[in-house]
Image (cartoon, helix red, strand yellow):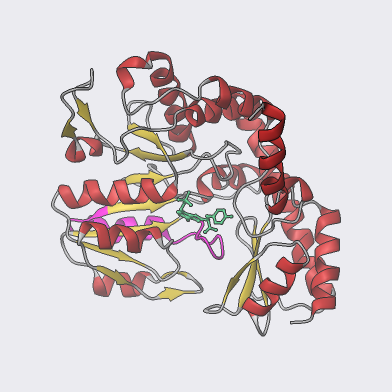
Amino acid sequence: MNENEIRKILRQYYEEDLHYDSGRILGSMYTQIPKISLEIFTLFHEANLGNPALYLGTQKIERKVVKFLLKLTSGSENFYGHVLSGGTEANITALWAARNAGFRRILTTQEAHFSLRKAADLLKVPIKFVRSNGHRMSVVDLRREIKDGDIVVANAGNTQFGFVDPIEEIGGICSMNRCYLHVDAAFGGFVIPFLNEIYEKKIKFGFEIPEVMSVTIDPHKMGLAPYPAGGLVARENIFKSIEVPAPYLTSGKSDNLLGTRQSGSVAAAYASILYFGWKGYRRLVRECMENTFYLVERAREMKFDVPYEPEMNIVNIKVKNPIAVRDGLLKLGWSVSASEEFGTIRIVVMPHVKKEIIEEFLKTLKKLGD
Ligand code: 0PR
């Protein structure tokens, strides 16, 4: 087939998908990516950090991205890290390393991302859910439950609410036991440092807490990098404990989960970091938060029940039948996520979710009923 025929065929499928330029994807943690990052993605599409010796340049870029992730997580420059395929791989890798270091049970909350259940299943490590208080880990329950050898996973921006667990207190409890503390800041890692600056908050979630061993922080969420770009940073070289020999590779070893690793997205993540820089990300977070407050205010004016004050750019609206509302919206070209468990629909106020979109959305939701 010639290029035009191929284009025509693929274009038809493309039209069936939802796209971020419609502004109507409200349930995802992705958004439109800067053009330059997509250009760099294509330029580096053949890079494969699964065989790093061939890609000395891309290796250096990975280190630059990790350095930025360490700045966001208050880590020191000589800490360790990898750009991985996403939050799922980052969480699995952290827990895999902890398991191999002798830790034996995962303690987290029901609000934690489902990737932790996958990790528990794959690693054959039991997982126990500690109770939450206002959808944040209850330190009283953690104190009661914790034992030597536990892997505690705290959330810095949980998937459903964007709430941050009391990680400093959790660290204190971990310090009294021999435990591994991992923080899932897949979404919040690119938000909290800027909330602290804009609103003069002092939310701690990273390596400023001495017990935090590793942090998941994803460029492909609020870092506005193209998929697949997750991040795992660590105080020590936790990757050593999952290393296997790979004799036919020039490096002779492999210290992360995947073999071939799409590494165009590593270069593209660095392009996004260069494009926005610290100040650019702060501006994005400020805009997202202003739109978040706008959404909450307008929704309440229109008599919707917004049961929680958002801590970051994630809003839950109570509805009687979340699944029916989600499906009804989808028929009209809108996407939100729905939780039967919490009785809400969830809106992630990413940079494409502007005030006009919010107005249009709330009007549609009102018409649809709950
Ligand atoms: N940790 C947290 C706190 C997350 O919110 C997520 C994903 C992960 C880990 C896993 O990350 P990966 O999906 O990169 O492996 N949270 C999003 C969510 O469930 C993922 C998502 C993104 C879902 C786009 C839908 C979508 O269209 O909302």
Residue depicted at 49% across the width and 39% down the height: 228
Q: Nearer the viewer, residue 193 or 63?
A: 63
* Position of 260 relative to 176 (above/below): above
Residue depicted at 66% across the width and 64% down the height: 336
Is 103 on the left or on the right of 136, as rendered? Answer: left
* Position of 316 relative to 224 (above/below): below
In the rendered image, residue 158 lying in the magenta stretch gets the answer: yes
Give residue 297's position: percent from left, percent from top: 79, 66
| Quadrant (top left/top right/bottom left/bottom right) for the C terminus | bottom right
Residue depicted at 56% across the width and 45% down the height: 221
In the rendered image, residue 78 lying in the magenta stretch gets the answer: no
Identify the image quadrant of residue 363: bottom right
Is 128 on the left or on the right of 161, as rendered? Answer: left
Is 129 on the left or on the right of 68, as rendered? Answer: left
Give residue 44's position: percent from left, percent from top: 51, 21
Is residue 351 visible in the rendered image? The answer is no
Q: Nearer the viewer, residue 137 or 323?
A: 323
Q: How many marks?
A: 0
Is residue 126 visible in the rendered image? The answer is yes
Give residue 78's position: percent from left, percent from top: 33, 26
Q: Nearer the viewer, residue 294 or 325?
A: 325
Give residue 12's position: percent from left, percent from top: 71, 46
Residue that lies at the very extreme toward the bottom in this rendered image: 320
Q: Which residues are magenta?
A: 157-180
Q: Nearer the viewer, residue 254 or 273?
A: 254
| Quadrant (top left/top right/bottom left/bottom right) for the N terminus | top right
